[in-house]
Each structure stands twice: as C-alpha cells, then as structure tokens.
Amino acid sequence: MSYVGPDFEPPRPPRHPLRGPLTVAVAALVPGALVGWLVWQTVGDSGGDAQASPSSTSSSWGRPATPGASDDGKEQPGGTGAGEKPNGSPSASAPTGSGPLKGKVVVIDPGHNPGNFQHTSEINQQVNIGTNSKECDTTGTATNDGYTEAKFTLDVARRMRTVLEKQGATVKFTQDGDRSWGPCVDERAEIGNKADADAVVSIHADGAGAGNRGFHVILPGSVHSGAADTRPIVASSRELGERVAGSFLRVTGSAPSNYIGGGTGLDVRKDLGGLNLSTVPKVFIECGNMRDSKDAAQLTSSAWRQKAAQGISEGIVSFLHG
Ligand code: ZN
C-alpha cells in the first residue's frame, strides 16, 4: 500500500527527451508499478505469515529497526581508523554523458566484497556510525550452492552502470572488485557524500531462512546522533526507495518480501551505518533471499539479474526525473 502514498506522485514530463529503451518504461513507470501492485494484492497473498498480507494497512515506515532477519542486521558501519585506507580506490566511470541524466551523479554500492572472507580481521574492526560502533563490513551471505552475495551485488551493479550511463548519468562505485576487502560502511557512505550524489543505492541479497522470499528496500530512519544526521534525507530517500521498489516489482515480477515490511516491500532501519552516515538520498535493496531455493534460482540467473538491474535503474531514473 505504500506505493500509493502521498510521495508516490507520477513523474513529471522529462525535462529532456528520453532516448533509448527506457523511454517507454519511464513513461509507464508509475502506472506499471500500480498495476503490478494490484496484481500482487490480488494473487500474492499465499503462503506467508501474517506480515505477508499485501492488503495490510500497517506501514513499515514507522517500524522499529528489525535487525536479525537480514544478514545485514549485523552490518555495521565501518569506519576504519584514522585515515586508514584499504588498497584500491573507488572507481569512477564514464564522464557525464549526453542523455537525459546528464549532470546527474549516481553512486552504486555493491554490498560486501568477494575478498572479505579472507580479511576477517580487517572487516571486523569497529567503526563509528554515529549512533554506536559496528563492524567495518561483513562477508555477506551466499546461496546453499555457494554463489556469494558479493558476486551477486557486483554483477547487478555493473549491469546497472551500463543502463544508467546510456541515460547520461555519471556513475560511481564504492568498490568494483578492485580492492581486496571493504570498504568499511562509513567509507561507503562517505563516497556517496563526497560525490554529492543525486541518488545512492546499495545492492544486497538477504540470508534469511528458507521459505522467506521476495525483495525489500531499506529506507533510512530519522537518526540524529553523533556524526549521523539523516533528518535531511529521510523524505527524499523514501521517495527514491518507493520508486525503486515499484519498478523492481514491475520489471522482475518478484513479490515484496513475505517476512519483512508487512507486504509493502519497504523497511525502515536506524542501525545501518551506510544509511546513518549518508547526507544524500540513499536506500538499500535486498533483491531476494539467497537461502531460499526458489529465490536462489532467480538470483543465480543472469537473465534475472539483468531484470533486477533494469528495475532498480528505472526506479533511479524515475526519482531523478521526479
Ligand atoms: Zn548484504
């Protein structure tokens, strides 16, 4: 139900003519999302727990943080100590293009790092996320067959970069498989902040129990503590998240999570350093549950990952044109 809230306004006509395959998709984004939502409302309420009811009127926006069900519940901001820089550097790509997103900066944060498994001491170091200290980063999860979340997030992020650069956006990554571990979550936030990004999306897949299915987008709660002050970005991040959730649902056909968010596909958290320390609009997306065999079949499919990348990207485009 959240998709039809007051913040979910139809996009205004683009300021520039859209070219390429996103033209129709963007024009149809909101109606498509609503159609998808209505279809889900009609057929989707099966097999879940009480929270899975898509007709629930409860809003996830006001829920307290719910660490635990997600692998990222353990995810903590990672501020390394003073000036400590793991090898490698954020990779910027393509200079600003000439498409409708010319001048827009999108930062994509591929969650975790394939090398984190070999650098446990580094990623376990504590960093300050404003509200408290947490681990620098985590290894992320994996499917039962060993396809890691870190590989998944990099693949989806690279597919997104292709889509968004075709629209003229300047796309930057927090890591591009070009460093041996990390970055820490505080550095991930800092990269978006320093880029003065118009939108930041952190890509993840969850590690919940079998039977838990579907995607959810994590929005920053209002936090004002220490170095964390999300108050200026709560509303814009919610709009970004709703756009991403709506287009992800429409393009992938995946249902909103049946275990988090009360069927809305949205969750609000105050315990993630990558969100707490952001000064620009930012959301996380958990694209599915790697520990569920049906979700895993999708997550390990390159064709499905292309749809996921397209859906997330179209949500970003819609947000930037809104
Ligand atoms: Zn993750």
Image: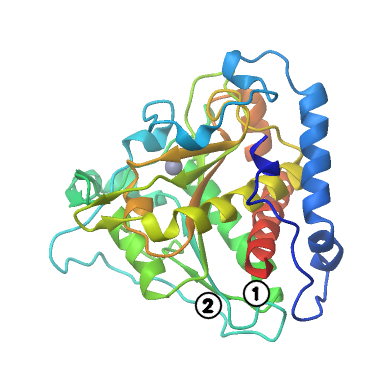
Q: Residue at x 65, y 48 (%)?
A: 6
| Viewer-nearest residue: 158 or 259 | 259
Q: Which residue is mark 1?
A: 165
Label 1 within 8 A of ligand 1 by Cβ: no
Residue shown at 27% from the left, 67% from the top:
87
Judged left or right of residue 315, residue 108 is left
Q: Nearer the viewer, residue 140 or 59?
A: 59
Mark 2 or mark 1: whose residue is earlier in sequence: 2
Identify residue type, mark 1.
Glu
Residue 130 drawn at (x, y percent)? 22, 52
Q: Residue at x 78, y 52 (%)?
A: 30
Assign ligand 1 to one image quadrant: top left
Which quadrant does the N terminus fall into? top right
- How busy is the neighbourhood of tag 2: few (under 14 within 10 Å), some, or many (20 plus)? few
Q: Categorize mark 1 by other alpha carbons within 10 Å: few (<14), some (14-19), many (20+).
A: many
Q: Is residue 267 above or below residue 164?
A: above
Q: Which residue is mark 2?
A: 93
Q: How many marks?
A: 2
Name which residue type carries label 2: Ser
Q: Where is residue 148 shown, x and y percent of the image?
A: 49, 40
Kindly state the secondary structure of the residue where label 2 is placed: loop
- Residue at coordinates 14% horizontally, 60% vertically from top-left? 81
Between 83 and 245, which is closer to the camera in this rendering?
Answer: 245
Quarter where residue 14 is shown? bottom right
Q: Is the C-beta separation of discs 2 and 1 under 8 Å? A: yes
Q: Is residue 300 visible?
A: no
The answer to whether residue 41 of the structure is visible from this angle is yes
Horizontally, residue 155 falls left or right of residue 26, namely left
Q: How is the image coloured?
A: rainbow
Determine the residue located farthest toward the right in the rendered image. Answer: 24
Residue 235 in percent (x, y) is at: 50, 54
Q: Quadrant of the C terminus?
A: bottom right
